[in-house]
Amino acid sequence: MPKKKIFKPTNTKMITFIYFFLLIYTIAALFWWGLLLHQQNKEIATIKTEILKEEQSPLSHQTIFQKKLTEIKQDSKLRDLQYLGEGGAFLLIILLSASFVFNAVRRQIKFTQQQQNFMLSVTHELKSPIAVVRLNIETLLKRKLPEDKKEDLLERTLAETNRLNRLSNNMLLASRFDSQKYELTKSTLNLSQLINKLIEETKSRKIKHILKLDIHPNIIVEGDKLMLQIACSNIIENAIKYAPKDSEISIQLKQQRDQAILQFSDQGTGIPNKEKTKIFNRFYRIGNENTRSSQGTGLGLFLTKKIVQQHEGQIIAKDNFPKGTIFEIKLPGTGTSQKA
């Protein structure tokens, strides 16, 4: 498989160089302006002193002479302080503005890179399942296969179409969140049944992970069924993607007071503390774009957090000991139902 091309703006270093060159030039010009004003102020004080000496003899009017000489010196000091204050204020404004502009430009460049990489990732994510589906269908049409192999091909094809469907849902949902056009359709639903069904669908794909379940029965919440399915599916897919094969993925659901607490635990490499909040940003993915081998668009966890927040809940990522990550979702619960 050819290596994905990653967006690298060729002019970023040049822009940064020009930006800092102009900033340093502006600051140097400010200091030069201050130095010239200070020199000019000294010359003015010297000229005023010489004029004072010519107009008034220091021997005949010593008191008046000293008084006026002191005034000249005080005026000179006040002007120096004025220049220093104005220059300091200008320098502070320049530095604050430069910092704001630099951070804004850097964020924009980074966001543009993430968008470009997202488009490349989406293209790859779309082409892979489409190629698999096409190959499977061509195999079914051209060859006579035993029933067990035919069924296996059909299951793989269905799994790939489900993968395409999840990707399409994520992209559509992200677009709706951007335009703020999506409104939740809340209803009373059995979260336990929803999670169990989602796990059964995941197992049917014959994943190479061990799913360990601890789902308390009949936990009821008020929520949008489709949105909660997407949120939970995104976290499970994230665990499958990053956790080692044959490792254990644990899903736990319980009721605690007035909250439904849902935990997804994996035994992957874990998430550094400084990344634990960034992973919920749009397009953000851990690691270097040039060396990352895992697939993904950087939308899954972003959408999951949005969905949880719209349900007035919260989601956090924490360490799973001895290794791995736990994603914990807390949703307002209405208790447990006695119905099976």
Image (cartoon, rainbow, N blue to C red):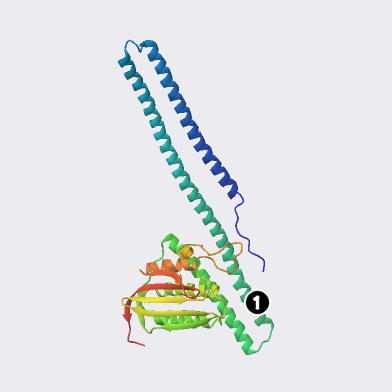
* 289 shown above or below 328: above
> Can residue 174 be seen here?
no
Residue position marked by numbered label 1 in the rendering: 135
Give percent across and percent down for residue 274. 47, 62
- Name the quadrant containing residue 311: bottom left
Quarter of the C terminus within the rendering:
bottom left
Residue 186: x and y in percent read 36, 73
Q: Tell me the quarter of the image containing the N terminus.
A: bottom right
Q: Residue at x 57, y 43 (%)?
A: 18
List x then y, in percent, for residue 124: 60, 67
* In this picture, residue 242 sits left or right of residue 75: right
**Residue 296 visible:** yes
Q: Nearer the viewer, residue 77 or 262?
A: 77
Residue nearer the viewer, 140 or 334: 334
Q: Residue furthest bottom?
A: 147
Q: Looking at the picture, does residue 294 appear above or below residue 178?
A: below
Question: In the figure, 213 relative to 32: above or below?
Answer: below
Q: Residue furthest front?
A: 59
Q: Mark 1: which amino acid?
A: Leu
Task: Residue at 36% x, 19% y: name it.
Answer: 69
Give how far across and how far down residue 28 sits, in percent: 51, 36
Locate residue 21: give its quadrant: top right
Instruction: Using residue 121 as the reference point, say whether residue 214 is left or right of it.
Output: left
Count of numbered circles in the view:
1
